[in-house]
Amino acid sequence: MKLDQITDGELSILQVLWEEGEATTRKLTTALYEEVTDSKMATVQKLTERLEAKGCVERDRKKRAHRFRPLVSHEQFLHSRLQALADRLCDGTLMPLITTLLQAKGISRSQRKQLRKLTSDLWPTRDTDTKTSK
């Protein structure tokens, strides 16, 4: 999968597919544009073809109206993009990105609680950790 080469237009297609699970070209076009025209349908069709070539979506050709579904999850996409950004800007480490985002945007009390739980779940403390850090 070429997740680092996804354009904004292709990303808009993926976002609809992540929400819907699967969709036809017409459904994608309707979700992206107020008015469905032949040129907009052609644009969406081209974008889905590109995503298929990149290995990001799968096309079901069993029915006349082909259905598309994502082969990459939103989480996989985010991980790939954030790691590429960290590689480019921070010598591969995510910590500067995380701290900058937290300081610039701020987070709510409930988000802080979720973050503490996540870090605790990912890296549970052990008695030996607390003894060595003193």
Image: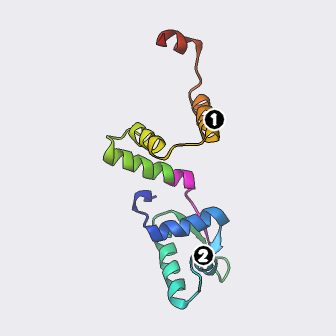
Badge 2: residue crowd in 10 Å (few <14, some 14–19, many ≥20): many
Q: Hey, which quadrant is residue 103 in on the image?
A: top left
Q: Look at 52% across and 78% down and name the residue there.
A: 44
Q: Look at 60% across and 75% down and name the residue there.
A: 28
Residue 24 percent across, percent down from the top left:
63, 76
Label placed on residue 113: 1
Q: Element at badge 2?
A: helix
Q: Is residue 84 left or right of residue 45?
A: left
Check disc 1 and give the amino acid type. Lys
Query: Is residue 124 at least partly visible in the picture?
Result: yes
Do residues under tags 2 and 1 come within 8 Å of each other at their CB atoms?
no
What color scheme is it?
A: rainbow
Of residue 3 and residue 101, the one placed in the foreground of this image is 101
Of residue 117 and residue 44, the one placed in the foreground of this image is 117
Residue 69: say if magenta: yes
Up-down: is 65 above or below 93?
below
Residue 36 percent across, percent down from the top left:
59, 86
Q: Which residue in the structure is indicated by mark 2? A: 28
Of residue 8 and residue 51, the one placed in the foreground of this image is 8
Q: Element at badge 1?
A: helix
Q: Look at 66% across and 76% down and name the residue there.
A: 62
Check disc 2 and give the amino acid type. Leu
Up-down: is 106 above or below 73?
above
Closer to viewer: mark 2 or mark 1 = 1
Residue 6: say if magenta: no
Q: Is residue 100 left or right of residue 88?
A: right
Query: Is residue 21 at least partly visible in the picture?
Result: no
Q: Hey, which quadrant is residue 34 in on the image?
A: bottom right
Q: Which residues are magenta?
A: 68-77
